Image: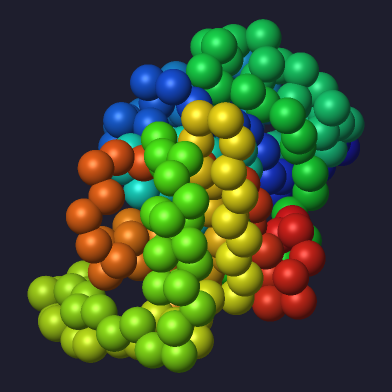
């Protein structure tokens, strides 16, 4: 009898930096498909007229954001091909602005994602701006208008949704570290919160972590 292939789901953790922050989710899917094909990893391919390697992104990133914790799930058909081997194979064919830093077996379902952490950098060191932003985020109510997927407009209060925030300044910038609901039925984009604050000329957003409902790193 021939050897039976064991299908295994693994999650690839990578950093999305530099020019890739301007790549849409659809184009990112095509981009990573090419990388997977170059890697020669023993992947499971979809069936049908146009087979392609199975991949899905957990909590796709907003356009214009960088990330230290992107998660892509793929399926392996060779159970002897280790997670370390997957990481090494992908690192060899990934460009410099994609950093593959970990590969793990899938544990929790994607629906268990509950929070995301962001680091927002403002090119501003004015103490008055920092104190104003802190007071804004500390309010008991921050009502904003949000448009849903089907164009449904609703008013939501962002204040109770802020899990944690911290502000700090260095010699040339102000940094806001903030944790917000993510995934599932409640997904808050930090840009929505900053828009409610008022006119901010520019800022840079980096997603730094994804958590489950117990505030453990999502796996």
The one nearer the camera, 141 or 182, is: 141
Q: Where is residue 52 in the image (x, y as percent from the top left)?
A: 43, 33
Query: Is residue 151 something that shows in the picture?
Result: yes
Q: Is residue 215 above or below residue 36?
A: below
- Relative to residue 157, is residue 92 depicted above or below? above
For image coordinates 53% across by 53% down, the residue present is 176
For the point 62% across and 70% down, the residue is 164
156 left or right of 204 in image? left
Q: Quadrant of residue 194?
A: bottom left
The residue nearer to you, when weighing 31 against 5, is 31
Q: Where is residue 31 in the image (x, y as percent from the top left)?
A: 40, 25
The reply to whether residue 205 is visible in this rendering is no
- Locate residue 130, reporting x and y percent: 47, 55
Among the 4 quarters of the image, the one containing residue 20: top left
Instruction: From the top left corner, tell me how far across and down residue 182 is, in percent.
Output: 50, 68
Residue at 68%, 45% in the rendered image: 11
Quadrant assignment, res 211: bottom right
What's the colour scheme?
Answer: rainbow
Q: In which quarter of the image is the C terminus?
A: bottom right
| The N terminus lies in quadrant | top right
């Amino acid at each position: 009898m021939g050897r039976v292939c064991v299908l295994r789901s693994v999650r690839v953790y990578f950093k999305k930096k530099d020019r890739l922050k301007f790549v849409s989710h659809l184009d990112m899917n095509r981009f990573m498909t090419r990388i997977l094909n170059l890697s020669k990893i023993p992947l499971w391919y979809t069936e049908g007229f146009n087979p392609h390697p199975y991949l899905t992104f957990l909590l796709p990133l907003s356009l214009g954001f960088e990330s230290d914790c992107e998660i892509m799930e793929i399926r392996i058909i060779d159970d002897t091909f280790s997670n370390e081997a997957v990481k090494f194979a992908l690192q060899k064919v990934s460009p410099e602005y994609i950093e593959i830093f970990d590969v793990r077996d899938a544990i929790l379902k994607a629906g268990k994602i509950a929070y995301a952490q962001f680091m927002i950098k403002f090119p501003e060191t004015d103490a008055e701006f920092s104190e104003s932003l802190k007071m804004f985020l500390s309010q008991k109510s921050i009502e904003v208008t949000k448009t849903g997927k089907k164009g449904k407009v609703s008013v939501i209060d962002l204040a109770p949704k802020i899990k944690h925030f911290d502000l700090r300044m260095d010699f040339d910038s102000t940094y806001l570290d903030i944790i917000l609901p993510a995934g599932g039925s409640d997904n808050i984009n930090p840009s929505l919160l900053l828009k409610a604050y008022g006119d901010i000329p520019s800022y840079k957003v980096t997603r730094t972590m994804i958590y489950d409902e117990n505030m453990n790193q999502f796996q």
